[in-house]
Amino acid sequence: MSNSVRIIEMGPRDGLQNEKAPVSVEARIAFVEALVAAGLSTVEVGAFVSPKAIPQMAGSDQVLRGVSHVKDTEFHVLVPNEKGYDAARAAGAEVVSVFAAASEGFSRANINCSVAESIERFKPVLTRAKADGVKVRGYISCVLGCPFDGEIKPKAVADLARTLWDLGCYEISLGDTIGVGTPLKAKQMLRAVAAEVATDKLAMHFHDTYGQALANLYAGMEEGVRVIDSAAGGLGGCPYAPGATGNVATEDVVYLLEGMGIRTGVDMTKLLAATNEVSRLIGRPPVSRVASALNAKTRAAK
Ligand code: HMG
Ligand code: MG
């Protein structure tokens, strides 16, 4: 396997968007800064969506303005439509992510429109982004199963990936939103998508509901995918994906990669400190196995 993997840190967005306890703008900025200091230079920091739908992401403009835009950092934000794009740009966004779904049921629940309508909403965003020199990432949700429509055919994912690619997305992030995938299914899906969009333009965004995310990531790496979305502490979940838990934990991904001899540039001690601080704020311990193990070790040494 090639010796480089890019991690896109999701904690401040996917991680916090489903938390009951409100986390202040100041604390979200501090969380982002702590993640960057730990070596996670690409961080999704917020979402320009309806604050009625996702109150947790209100103030994303302040978060984006508040974080230090130092060299080599890249901050991503979600935008569902032109309104979100306008707000994101006004706050200085240079990378935005549009998000579609491989299933009609999830598209309707999440963004209140059909898949085809969502593409129509994205078209002006992509046209304007191109003119503005803004990079656009494209998500596809429910690539390995949908909470409403059930099984998803790899071809449906592949066709949508092609559409987003043709519209001008620079990378397609494939979301196992409800974490139901298993390694062979993940491989089949990735092979189907790779027939439409080059493997080096794909990212894996796997939630860990059924504890399969690391195995699925490993399977995807065997297929050649080298970009991984993960969230500190395994935070996260989508409010419109009933029962789904967080993203695969960044600590667990870093431990896996380093164990394979793949350098991540992430300082585990600093990452753990960032995770522990946000866990304190939301009032529950990290679900990451690595964070639990390291915290137990620290307690035992005291
Ligand atoms: P809608 O109701 O169809 O939109 O919502 P609308 O155009 O009819 O507008 C309704 C209201 O929303 C209006 O306000 C608009 O101004 C406002 P009102 O007149 O009622 O006061 N509005 C907005 N406000 C702020 N920013 C905007 C915006 N657009 C409209 N951009 C909409 C459509 C998409 C806006 C809504 O359904 C929404 O915000 N949904 C939230 C979706 C979301 O954030 N989901 C979670 C993130 S996706 C995810 O987690 C999956 C992912 O991680 C990958 C994976 O795991 O699979 C990415
Ligand atoms: Mg997600």
Image (cartoon, helix red, strand yellow):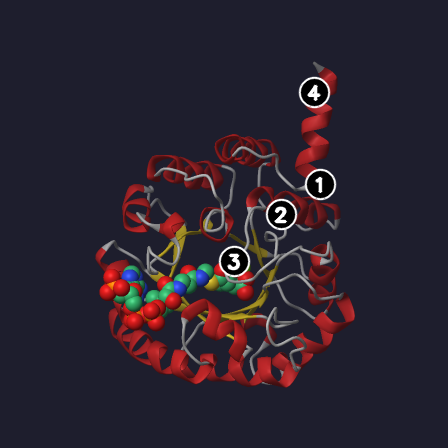
Q: Amino acid at mark 2?
A: Ala
Q: Earlier in the sequence, mark 3 or mark 1?
A: 3
Question: Horizontal and vertical percent for residue 20?
Answer: 48, 43
Which quadrant is home to the C terminus? top right
Which residue in the structure is indicated by mark 2?
Answer: 249
Disc 1 + disc 2, Cβ < 8 Å: yes
Density class for disc 3 (Cα within 10 Å; few <14, some 14-19, many ≥20) is many
Marks 3 and 1 sit apart, C-alpha to C-alpha, by 21 Å
In this rendering, the label closer to the viewer, 3 or 1: 3
Q: Tag 2's secondary structure?
A: loop
Q: Tag 3's secondary structure?
A: loop
Marks 1 and 4 sit apart, C-alpha to C-alpha, by 15 Å
Question: Horizontal and vertical percent for residue 8?
Answer: 52, 54
Q: Earlier in the sequence, mark 1 or mark 4?
A: 1
> Is ligand 1 within 8 Å of the beta carbon of the residue shown at mark 3?
yes
Residue 299: mark in rendering: 4
Question: Horizontal and vertical percent for residue 129?
Answer: 30, 71
Specify whether residue 47 is in view: yes
